[in-house]
Amino acid sequence: MNVTIHSNRWINKGNGENIMFADVAKIHIRSGRGGDGHVSFRRELYVPNGGPDGGDGGKGGDLIFEVDPGLNTLYDFRHKRKYVAEDGYPGGKKRCHGKNGKDLVIKVPAGTIIKEAESGKIMADLSYENNRVVLLKGGRGGQGNMHFATSTMQAPKYAQPGQDALELDVILELKSIADVGLIGFPNVGKSTFLSSVTAARPKIANYHFTTIDPNLGVVDLPQMDGFILADIPGLIEGASEGVGLGHKFLKHIERTRVLIHMLDASSSEGRDPIHDYEVITGELKDYNEEIAQRPQVIAANKIDCLSQDEQEEVKKRLGSYFEKKGIPIFFISAIAKTGVQELLYHVKSVLDQLPKEKIVFETEYEAFREEAKNTPYEVTLEEEERIFHVSGMRVEKMLGYTNIESEKGFEFFQKFMVEQGVIDRMKALGLQEGDTVEIMGQLFDYYE
């Protein structure tokens, strides 16, 4: 059976597939580099000295993330860690423009957060209406030599190199999209409850951590809109500190607006439901105080396991405890579905009273070209000989593509050195007239 969450936000496959859940992945991404401009000249019959006709290089491909509603895990990213968009093609003769590199579109589940790996800052939140983002733009193609012809320089022998690609490591983190989170200790009946009120079919068994991934389902209520419910697994004492699987799954509660806190009213495993409540609430506070303050509804489950007298005693004890806290409590049986409908209608009424705003994580980091690449050049001073050494891929690449033997070419390269801040960097180190500058083994004398 395939269960589709409303608005195509999630598809949960309940077809018996045993797919390992993965909600965090680290990958390396790179946009395409721009294609180099071309140097060439027309060669036509009876025109021995034709003008420049070198074409422009193509743009590098963009690196794009896009939501695929058919995905609900980041498992595929465990097999492939490097994603590279296509580079732009170089320009050609006869003013031929190089082909643009193909964009690379990476598919992710709804609710995926993309973080810059080193800083941990959020680059994008692919949730709700935000289902596509160009994370890294491809490099601009370089101009061919046809652009550099002037009245005094009619045969330029240089072209512009393509713009560098952007690349960095990112962390993908899945935070489930659900209106209501179902929390509680293992074996209190969360999976049974989810399967009884939605079409989701989580695995159910009597041992800890049967549920190894957040199961989602749609709760449909007669004559009104339903809501999305997520069973959040892995909550035990110490979860906020990473004990068990707790820290791994607490992130899935961050988008929920209401929490159903399920307790075992029958104490079938020898645990006290009030103590369980206090432990889980403490873990929520330790993880995120704001989440712990969100509206809660208590679902005291397994009431059918008690005799009539025991039920009255438990209802009196638990009812008194939660009444003092101002938290509504419903005594239910997830298996018999006793009291379940009343609980669901109450949760829906709480949701309706809350602001309709969606929980979206704001962008904290943008991959500008200056930030994502290595230092474009390095300047060092050999003080004894007064020689300034300039190195770096960008400067060396420009020098390699520039004909400095020509006046126009040398002027073009000097302008590049000024615009890139190389001259200022050398001046900061004490550059003076008459000093020597070395680039790629070539020596230049500096004059103002």
Image: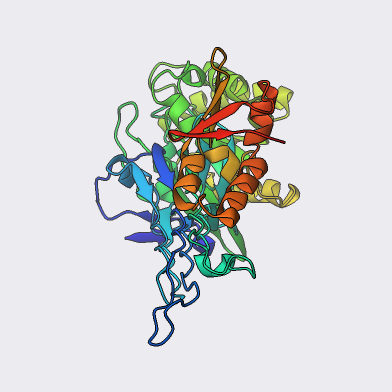
The image position of residue 195, as x and y in percent, is 40, 48
Q: Tell me what residue is drawn at x 52 percent, y 46 percent.
A: 340
Q: Tell me what residue is drawn at x 46 percent, y 75 percent.
A: 95
Q: Tell me what residue is drawn at x 45 percent, y 48 percent.
A: 216
The image position of residue 395, as x and y in percent, is 51, 41
Count of labels in the image: 0
Q: Quadrant of residue 369?
A: top right
Q: Quadrant of residue 320?
A: top right
Do we see residue 255 in this rendering? no
Name the quadrant of the C terminus: top right
Vertical order, 341 against 284 (above or below): below
Vertical order, 173 against 285 (above or below): below
Q: Tell me what residue is drawn at x 44 percent, y 43 percent.
A: 193
The image position of residue 306, as x and y in percent, is 44, 28
Q: Nearer the viewer, residue 131 or 37?
A: 37
Q: Nearer the viewer, residue 128 or 25?
A: 25
Vertical order, 402 against 236 (above or below): below
Q: Horizontal placement of 223 versus 74: left or right?
A: right
Name the quadrant of the N terminus: bottom left
Q: Nearer the viewer, residue 51 or 201?
A: 51
Q: Horizontal placement of 361 versus 90: left or right?
A: right
The image position of residue 304, as x and y in percent, is 44, 35
